Amino acid sequence: MKTYWRSIEELDNPKELRRAEVREEAKQKSMLMKGDSDLNGSSRRDFLKTFGFGIAAASIVASCKRPIDKAIPYLVKPAEITPGTANYYASSFFEGNEYGSVAVKVRDGRPIKIEGNALSSISQGATSARVQASVLNLYDDARFKNPSKSGSEITWEKADKEIIAQLSELKSQGGKVVLLSSTIISPSTREIIRKFTEKQTNTEWIQYDPVSASGIILANLTSFGKNLPDSQAAIIPDYRFNKAKVVVSFGADFLGTWLSPVEYTKGYTAARNLQDGRKEMLRHYQFESGLTLSGSNADVRFPIKPSEEGAIVLALYNAIARAKGAQVLSGVQSSVDISELAADLLENTKQSIVISGSNDVNIQLLINGINQLLGNYGQTIGLDTPLLTKQGIDEKTDRLLVDLKAGNIKALLVWNANPVFDHPKGAEFADAIKKTGLSISFSERKDETTAVCQYILPEPNYLESWNDMEPKTGIFSLSQPTIAPIFNARAPQETLLKWAAIESNYRDFIQNFWKENLFPKQKESADFRLFWNSSLQNGVFEAVQESKLNYSSDGTAQAASRIKPAIAGIELVIYESIALGNGKHANNPWLQELPDPVAKISWDNFAALPVEYAEKNGLKNEDVIRVNGVELPVFIQPGQAKDTISVALGYGRQVSGKVGDKTGTNIYPMIETENGFRKYFLSSVKVDKVPEKVIHLAISQTHHSMEGRAIVREATFDEYLKKPVAGNEKESEDMANSHTLYKMPVYNGHHWGLSVDLNSCTGCGNCAIACQAENNIQVIGKEQVRNRRIMHWIRIDRYYSENPENPKVSFQPVTCQHCGNAPCENVCPVAATPHSEEGLNQMAYNRCVGTKYCVNNCPYKVRRFNWFQFVKNDKFDFASNSDLGRMVLNPDVTVRSRGVVEKCSMCVQRIQEKKQLAKLEGRAIADGEIKTACSQSCPGNAILFGDLEDPESRISKLFNDPRHYHLLEELHTLPSVGYMTKVRNSKV
Amino acid sequence: MRKVNLLPDLQLRLKTLISLIFFSIFLISGNSLLANISDEEDNSASEHQIHEDLQRGERFFKGLLPKDRKFETCVSCHTLHESDSLNWNPSAMDIALKYSGKDFTDFQSAVMEPNGKKMEASHKDFKIEVEDLKKVKMYLDQLAVTGPPPPGPTINMIIIFVLLGLLMTFSVLDLIFFHKIKYRFISVIILLITLGIQVYMIAEAAIGLGRSPGYAPNQPIKFSHKIHAGDNRIDCKYCHHLAEYSKSAGIPAMELCMNCHVLVREGSHSGKFEIAKVVEANETKKPVEWIRLHNLPDHVFFSHAQHVGIAKVDCKKCHGAVQEMGIMKQSSDLSMGWCINCHRQTKVNFKDNAYYDKYLKLHEDLKSGKLDTVRAVNIGANDCMRCHY
């Protein structure tokens, strides 16, 4: 059997690691015991004191009157609102270049949870962790409460008057105005901007993305732009992973952060799904430097230096061109043998996808060439619905900076962009903006750019506003307000309409826009009102038109000649963080505390070093190195390519709010620009150790040791084809040996269970945040995460196996297993955790006295103890320490207090809600009607909830699959949570 | 060794006990001391005049003046203190607040030219000089600012508790030092009895913590469930119309009251005063702030839909004889034991709801006669996570 290891320390010396862990635990415990007085001398007097006080308190409290609660009814009850019952509204999320079609759960007027919208062809019911956490951004104290001018409050009327006067003066003088925004995918907003620029003729609109897709867009412009206007060919094509059999990715983390990860994960896992006896499986090759989420899931992974990428892509192009009889291009030679990969691709023409995350237009041109030779366009890569979520071109912002510095721009309007933080020359931007005559920010919350802007005209949160979106050409969706604006904010669209002297509110404008432009594109409804209402209810409207794009190989040969050879020396790779994206969500405590899926580190970015390098240079975790002058904490990352260091963007915010400020280091200033394109790696970096300095990291990697037992079971695809039970032989053995003296549990009606398909779990972390939002799980901060007290009810264990230079990675979501024969239940001295009639392992918080016996006796280590009061406590100054932040709490779930144990309840509130509905309607519960928070929005469809008592249910079928097994089934705990083996499709 | 140690230990205990008692006494007396301090330092003549007028107004209101009074006193209907039974007439405080911002003429016409049958009947014989009525208005205006006078002291449990404590202390002191009581066993009995009562009181109080059966606060409107649900037989679910579908039974929106009160503007008991509040709330768009009675702790999930909509439990079963309640009161203690007992007894309508079709084992047991009826407890109604999650 394979040996799995969790960290380098464990691989090297498992015994020493365990010893260190025990020492650490003992230290923690001794800290708890320590008080002011010694233990012997205080007991009697203390007892008397407490006893006396207790009596006094009891008698005083008993004679006190109960607090008076008010019950205030509606004056006029809105017809659609039922107090105590949630409503769902379809809406759309778009922030930080990430799109998600969502259903917003609104309970008694407050949005409290985001679900994926199943009607959208992009989201397909799923979300990412960032989308899940976005509901907390609504209740962020860092949001602007009023419009302001130079730091002091101003009324909207006054601001409008002053700005309109200045703009018209600039117009008459011919002074240039620039509207700098992040990518805008709202068609009606684009129309408003067009109208505004018509009125304010001297205005230029620049779209700016901190991590742009310039390389892809401009490469496609060359490949498809022949005889076409730029706007039609400058596209990001639509990758359809569900149709692919082979995927080759060069450094693109398409399951984590690249372009549209949720959609790609849906397609990717669908193409790898082996449920119901499916015998086909996508094979995934990944070339990359740091170990990304995509790399962790790859069947074949090649650790390479980023500067090697070009040569490898060229070699692959030539290998395929040779086989296809196309022209072979000359250029630098590759160091990696790709002949097998090329053969695999050639076997699967029209059924493969080759992508690159590089921002180098030459590499992207070669990638286009490869896809064209393989016949992928129109098959696995669609051109009719190009992705519109990244439209910024790096060069334009760089030119803007030059103009700003030269004083050519008289007024700058910043909308949803933060160049002072996320542009490589942010400091120069700050100085230039300060010198600009008129600077206006529409930012919703404070950031580095608002700090230097004159006027701040805050925009409402997306949950408070109307909007429409076109994430892909022809695929539209709507946003609608789900709560009245909490603060005095106004949609920038309304502001621009006002400044352009157009009398309309934004909602009417969208409606008219849809009436004129989208209504004619459909035939289902004859009446616009019906069309509008159904689009609003569904959240989406699709009207796809055929593409007119044709490939031309122009520029490919030239691109090949421009590919540079690999460079010697250490290279720094810069990537987007899974939790924080490009840094926009830095003030969101849920995301800050979400451990990186691979490194399992939260609250910081870090320099991921290759194992060999660290050993050679005597570096260990939490040491500090200086990379080109920037100090970073060291984390030794198995799988990190030789001579590379990886570090994440998004950290190191200075002006973001109480949570995000000063966590980690800002890496944006290190990014270099080459030929007008941002380059996300640095060659020949200078690395030296900072002696005797330590930066502590909140590593949850060595949490929850499973002590090397067979908990992740896996097989290769070939083995699986021969024998579906491959890798899972132990299951039947364990079950045969399973005997018990205890009575087997009997279920009368339901027996709820979860099934987790390890082959579909990519480890993205969405479930952890979905669970956190649903179940009021508290954020505990870096210090407590370091103390191994992270509260997440579902954690995703990550195991490595085989070679530490390039390990195989397995992800395993672990939640309470709801054992039929639960070890926790029979050790509780106060019966706070009994078993339910429906197979749930229950937790009654008000009964719990905090002995933690259950925590110790749980073999899965899924129980969490509230070491502190995390709500209304200044020591834990996160969302739950303010009235505003607590508005996100789910009223159906108790907020746990100090001293009690908590754990996964299998979303019992959702079970009860649907059961009640079924009973009211006098019908049986349909299979799939109840979804737990983790299963609802899982982008991989890895988690399934259902009734194990119903032999026809989907989960019962999965529990009878040969790949099904339980965690530690040899202990005879009879879990209600089952797993399915992981299958790897690496060619032997 | 042990004997030596016993004495200081006992002394220490006594010290603690005594200091505790003194502490409690201090707490109580401190409170009343604070309450007695008032500001009576009006020196100037005009202030003296005002003071006198106010006093005269108060006397008129309370019926001490005029001396030859033949009509009912104001205070007999418009009480100063809140009462346990429903007093239909607006309280003094109610009137004071309503007219505090208005002119004397409004007040005068309201009093002297009664509007509505009920008020006409009670104000029929009322005679008062205009000057005196002005003073009454002054007094009421003053009342609106100061609020109702504090209620007199009542002997509550804490005083009994302290007295018992004193008695206990005395018996202990007597046992050890004074030896005034001839027979020691009497002291011991006193000690045991007082201690027993105290323990009982503490236990009762502790069990009752957070529970409040019989809680019947005065509501901002004298809304009588007896009139609505009892006399007029309005169905509970006409107003609390969410009870069958939602977790919350729903407090009716103010507009719902207007369905009837758009026509019904005068009550047979309350006259126009109370109903006018409902109309006013609708006109001023300020909802009435009711005092909440039935308040389960935050960690308890309760759904009306489950009980009323599905199990068809009669409202009275938990809320008592609401149709007889002038002032709404909490009739059950809402304790967990009370919930659980009901779940043990309540039969489930197992056959008529298709939801239960999947409970195959229970259906079999019913057929074979192993079970005579399925009760709520059989389908897990007493599981922790039915109510606590």
Image (cartoon, helix red, strand yellow):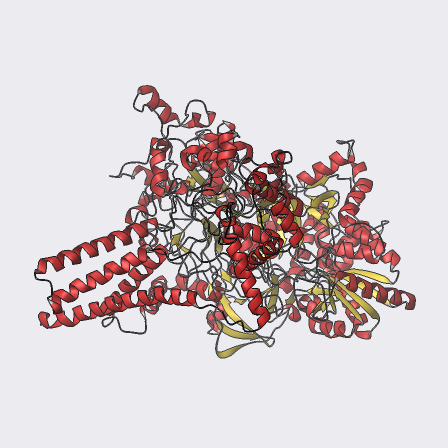
Q: Which x, y percent locates residue A598?
A: 51, 58
Q: Is residue A941 above or below residue A563?
A: above
Along the viewing direction, whichever of A832 and B87 lies nearer the viewer = B87
* Residue A116 visible somewhere in the drawing: no
* Residue beneath the point at 24% across and 61% down: B165
Q: In this view, does A528 lie above or below A630?
A: above
* Residue B359 visible somewhere in the drawing: yes
Q: In which quarter of the image is residue A335?
A: bottom right
Q: Is residue A231 above or below residue A150?
A: above
Q: Which x, y percent locates residue A358?
A: 67, 59
Report the residue that reaches farthest toward the front.
B68
* Residue beneath the point at 79% across and 47% down: A509
Report the residue that reaches farthest toward the bottom.
A691
Q: Determine whether, in the image, residue A172 is placed left or right of residue A970.
A: right
Q: Which x, y percent locates residue A378?
A: 72, 41
Q: Determine whether, in the image, residue A481 is placed left or right of residue A895.
A: right
Along the viewing direction, whichever of B301 and A401 lies nearer the viewer = B301
Along the viewing direction, whichever of A545 and A946 lies nearer the viewer = A946
Q: Which x, y percent locates residue A819?
A: 36, 43
Q: Determine whether, in the image, residue B339 is placed left or right of residue A471.
A: left
* Residue beneath the point at 88% across and 64% down: A168
